[in-house]
Image (cartoon, rainbow, N blue to C red):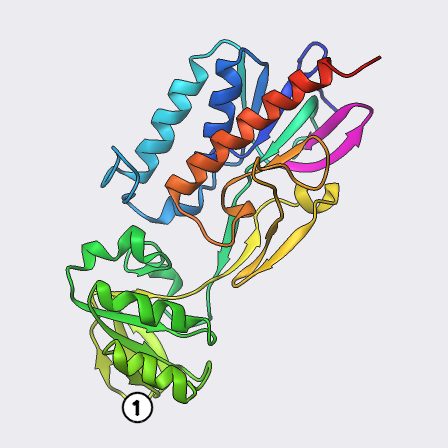
């Protein structure tokens, strides 16, 4: 078993090198703390070519934002970067020990978990191949670019009402029920009030750009589709450490306080793994808070009576 040279250990290990993790590490680096970022290289929005709605970066390539952030972070001399997956974490003494997929072990006084989530899509042929390109989950991220065209919502449960009632601000909406649920009278009235059309024929597959092929043979071309994915955490570390969870509309996420602190002392969580829903701007903000909070907890530790 190998150990990454780190003298007496890092002040903070940040697990996850996407927007939230980069933002957290930046605050710590600017406080001149020794930081290790462990990154598996699987950003949630890696399927999308461009990012929208993030101030000063609207329309910028999603990968470019992450690459610039990493380059700026690595310019700080107290930052180390390790590519790979963190597979296990335990509390040891006054800190934590993290094991990587190659068997290396690293230690720190604090942990920031920013491992993100994985989206699990309904098993509709052609849907996953278009994820992030013409099939989306966030209207604020991708709705404007559909240019007020035909927008489809593929229902996965009654929660798809949320998409169906939001999206008329971005185009003409068809809700494909696909056998997921049947709207009640109040829901039907709300959909009618927003001008949403209903389609009850099941979806056979997605073709072309975002064409919905129905089981009766009809094809309804769409400018884009929206679907609520089931989210699961991409990293097992929060569960291993015993962090308390919350049940969200699309899956579990880590419960945190206003400072991004988890229920486990010394562990801070940020980004999509600590939100019921999120985007790049939220991830960066939450990451900054987690980094600041982790730093402040280190200061507070020094002030504890002997």
Question: Which segment is the magenta one?
Answer: 86-99
Q: Is residue 87 magenta?
A: yes
Q: Is residue 75 left or right of residue 11?
A: left
- Residue 21 visible in this rendered orientation of the protein: no
- Location of residue 214 with respect to 84 vertically, above or below: below
- Residue 77: % across, % down: 49, 9
Q: Residue at x 24, y 86 (%)?
A: 218
Query: Mark 1 = which residue?
Result: 216
Task: Give SS at disc 1.
Answer: loop
Q: Is residue 62 magenta?
A: no
- Residue 189: % across, % down: 33, 85
Q: Quadrant of the N terminus?
A: top right
- Residue 205: % across, % down: 34, 75
Based on the displayed image, in which of its 4 quarters is residue 94 positioned? top right
Q: Quadrant of the C terminus?
A: top right
- Along the line of sight, which residue is nearer the eye, 215 or 184? 184
- Along the line of sight, which residue is nearer the eye, 299 or 42? 299
- Residue 244: % across, % down: 70, 49
Q: How many marks?
A: 1
Q: Residue at x 46, y 29 (%)?
A: 23
Q: Residue at x 36, y 60 (%)?
A: 129
- Location of residue 291 with respect to 167 vertically, above or below: above
- Location of residue 266 with respect to 269 vertically, above or below: above
Q: Residue at x 37, y 73 (%)?
A: 154
- Residue 73 visible in this rendered orientation of the protein: yes
Secondary structure mostly seen in the magenta stretch: strand
Q: Tag 1: Cα neighbours inside 10 Å, few (<14), some, or many (≥20)? A: few
Q: Is residue 193 left or right of residue 264?
A: left
């Amino acid at each position: 078993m190998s150990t990454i040279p780190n003298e007496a250990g890092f002040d903070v290990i940040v697990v996850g090198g996407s927007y939230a993790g980069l933002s957290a590490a930046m605050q710590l680096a600017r406080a001149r703390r020794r930081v290790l970022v462990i990154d598996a290289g699987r950003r949630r929005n890696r399927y999308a070519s461009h990012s929208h709605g993030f101030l000063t970066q609207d329309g910028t390539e999603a990968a470019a934002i992450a690459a610039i952030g990493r380059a700026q972070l690595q310019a700080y001399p107290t930052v180390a970067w390790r590519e790979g997956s963190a597979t296990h974490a335990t509390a040891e003494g006054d800190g934590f020990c993290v094991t990587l997929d190659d068997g290396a072990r690293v230690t720190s006084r604090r942990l920031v978990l920013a491992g993100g989530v994985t989206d699990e899509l309904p098993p509709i042929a052609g849907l996953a191949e278009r994820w992030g390109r013409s099939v989306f989950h966030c209207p604020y991220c991708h709705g404007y670019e559909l240019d007020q065209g035909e927008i489809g919502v593929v229902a996965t449960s009654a929660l798809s009402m949320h998409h169906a009632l939001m999206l008329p601000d971005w185009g003409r909406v068809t809700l494909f029920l696909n056998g997921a649920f049947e709207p009640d009278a109040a829901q039907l009235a709300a959909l009618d009030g927003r001008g949403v059309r209903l389609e009850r024929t099941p979806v056979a597959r997605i073709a072309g750009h975002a064409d919905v092929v129905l089981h009766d043979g009809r094809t309804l071309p769409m400018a884009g589709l929206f679907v609520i994915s089931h989210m699961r955490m991409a990293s097992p570390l929060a569960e291993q450490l015993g962090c308390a969870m919350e049940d969200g509309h699309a899956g579990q996420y880590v419960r945190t306080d206003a400072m991004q602190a988890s229920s486990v002392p010394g562990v801070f969580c940020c980004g999509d793994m600590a939100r019921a829903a999120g985007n790049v701007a939220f991830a960066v903000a939450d990451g900054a808070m987690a980094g600041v909070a982790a730093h402040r907890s280190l200061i507070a530790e020094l002030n504890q009576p002997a």
